Amino acid sequence: MSSPTRSPPDSDADSDTSSPTSSSLRHPDLSSTIFRSYTDHSSPDLSKIQSFLTSSRSGALSCLICLDPIRPSHPTWSCLSGCHAVFHLPCIQSWARQSSDLSSSRAASRLPISASKADEISLWSCPKCRLDYPKTLIPRTYLCFCGKLENPPHDPWILPHSCGEICNRSLKRNCGHHCLLLCHPGPCPSCPKLVKSRCFCGGLEDVRRCGFKDFSCNGVCGKLLDCEKHRCGEICHEGGCPPCKAKGVYRCQCGRLKEERECCDRDFRCGDPCGEMLGCGKHFCGRGCHVGECGECPLQGKRGCPCGKRVYEGMACDVLVPLCGATCGKMLSCGYHRCPERCHRGPCVETCRVVVVKSCRCGSLKKEIWPVRGSARRCGIVDAMLVSGAAVMGTVRLAQRFVTGDLGVRTTNVLLHATVDCGWVVEISRKYAHLK
């Protein structure tokens, strides 16, 4: 058996592999060995693996945390869920612990949780793609790329940091097949198995690779649309068909109005009252445009008096319900009192006529008035507003604002108290003109 062709040692080779003996044992072409189960190398995922192999052979593969080269004998970790970048194992462990501790301290300071709970929910992220990992997934051991072997040995005949066995990880889309490549970095490529598949519309059957079994025949879809009257006119496509856009003349739900509309919008309401005669033969339907029966007359069956305190049964729908004679008791517009009138038809009085004692805004005066919702009475006493810089050399400068009160108070010699920011209380005695 002929010996393999010897390649010159890499310029960035590891110190433990830089001897002529070890460097001469490097496999000349790892790509052909890894990709021997695949005949098509055009997959983007395969391109990522080939790029890693090129970087590994040239010594250009570097850790993005410490920026030092990744040697074949260095323990590593790769981001399997996101970007698949490779890092030194000690570097990513230190990065993950610091990020997790920072996340935990932030959560404990912002949320009403204990320190142990904050530690449980702490996260750390990949330095490259920023994908979040829980604290439980901080890498603790050196595994090969496929995760089957712990502390994979450095072998110049296989890819560094790999076990040399078939990857056998489950492929994307859960097709039921497994990766046929040898243990490799980066994402597993699309499934290469040949399977029978149909196009999106189901009109064409073909034998394709499992990873690319979904395809379009570029013909007209032709599936029956939701309206169950027309068929899809789009090119063979993935997913559900679009709403039917066929034009037609359709009636509203009550059947009075005709309009030209798209088929997908054929069920509409005209906005007018139904107006159909109810079952009682005496009243008309007051509902808006609707589909189906109008239902029974709402005035039949149990009916209550206007205040709702008494219920009558068996009355004809065209007979007025008698008044019960009790106090109405409905809440008035003021929001504080109830209607004192006898049970009556129609709305209650708009203005509350109950007299109450209310205070003005400052609380200085009280007066009996009719309550009005949201009202705020003013006593007519002048407000004092502190101006910026009021306490200067023991002098307090006040700005007075004269306000006409709406209580009709005639105010003279008002003693006004104003509290300054520094805590001083200044008493000001002034004489004001009669206010309206």
Image (tube, rainbow, N blue to C red):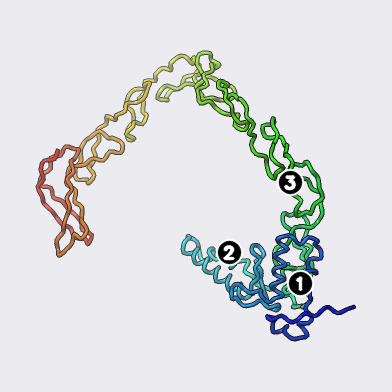
Examine the rendering and report whether any part of residue 295 can be seen.
no
Give the residue pinned by disc 2.
130
Tell me the SS state at disc 2: loop
Where is residue 143? Give x, y as percent: 70, 71
Q: Position of residue 85 (x, y in %)?
A: 65, 68
Q: Please, what secondary structure does the residue beneath circle 1 have?
A: loop
Q: Quadrant of the N terminus?
A: bottom right
Residue annotated with mark 3: 216
Q: Residue at x 56, y 62 (%)?
A: 121
Q: Position of residue 243 (x, y in %)?
A: 64, 36
Q: How many other residues sit within 10 Å of disc 2, few (<14), some (14-19) or many (≥20)?
A: few
Q: Earlier in the sequence, mark 1 or mark 2?
A: 2
The local crowd at label 3, few if under 14, some if 14 to 19, many if 20 or more residues have their Cα within 10 Å, is some
- Relative to the observer, which residue lies in front, 48 or 79? 48
Q: Is residue 340 above or below residue 77?
A: above
Q: Are marks 3 and 2 in contact (CB under 8 Å)?
A: no
Q: Nearer the viewer, residue 293 or 344?
A: 293
Question: Going 66% across and 66% down the picture, which residue do you hit?
Answer: 84
Query: In x, y percent, where is residue 74?
Result: 68, 78
